[in-house]
Amino acid sequence: MYSLWVAPEAIKELGDTKRYPAKVARQLLIKILELSVNPRPQDSIQIETGFRVDSGEYRIFYELDHRAQMVKIYLVGKRGDDVPADTTADNSPAAVAEAVPAEGASGVVETTVEASAEGSVDVGAPKTE
């Protein structure tokens, strides 16, 4: 089983309830969690240095670090979106990779994900340790 690292920008994006209603956020979170069990699902496509997997009308861009057994989620967005929601942020894998803790480093990005009985999903703000 692979561990998951999700870029703070992707966590912030998933928490935007206007762009990602509860049902969509839940589907994307499930797909992200499934990547920890099967990091190369049949519908994944290799692009540049990473992979892309679709979930409905949305895409998840990620890289695999086989040595560290880690899936690194960089971007989540609607198919056809050419511009990230925050156009001031550099969301390229190379830029975001600088925020990824090096092997053996203590920096970890964590967040909370809560689902209510009514079906709403709440993605908490990223916390760093």
Image (cartoon, grey):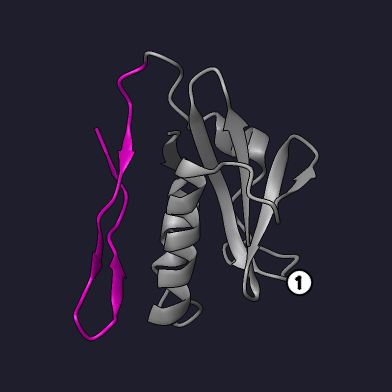
Give the farthest residue toward the top: 104
Q: Nearer the viewer, residue 76 or 43?
A: 43
Determine whether 57 is above or below 36 in the image. Answer: below
- Identified at 42% across, 56% down, the residue is 11
- Considering the image in quadrants, where does the C terminus appear? top left
Asked if the stretch drawn in magenta spans residue 112, the answer is yes
> In the image, is 94 to the left or to the right of 76?
right
Give the farthest residue toward the right: 48
Q: Position of residue 68 (x, y in %)?
A: 48, 20
Q: Nearer the viewer, residue 118 or 125?
A: 118
- Identified at 54% across, 17% down, the residue is 67
Determine whether 73 is above or below 22 in the image. Answer: above
Give the farthest residue toward the bottom: 118
Residue at the spot of label 1? 80
Residue bounds of the magenta highlight: 105-129
Q: Nearer the viewer, residue 71 or 39?
A: 39
- Identified at 43% across, 61% down, the residue is 30
Asked if the stretch drawn in magenta spans residue 14, the answer is no
Q: Position of residue 78 (x, y in %)?
A: 64, 71
- Neighbor class of circle 1 (other Cα within 10 Å; few <14, some 14-19, many 20+) is few
Q: Position of residue 112 (x, y in %)?
A: 25, 55
- Identified at 23% across, 86% down, the residue is 118
Q: Amino acid at mark 1?
A: Gly
- Considering the image in quadrants, where does the N terminus appear? top left
Secondary structure type for disc 1: loop
Q: Position of residue 74 (x, y in %)?
A: 57, 46
Q: Quadrant of residue 53?
A: bottom right
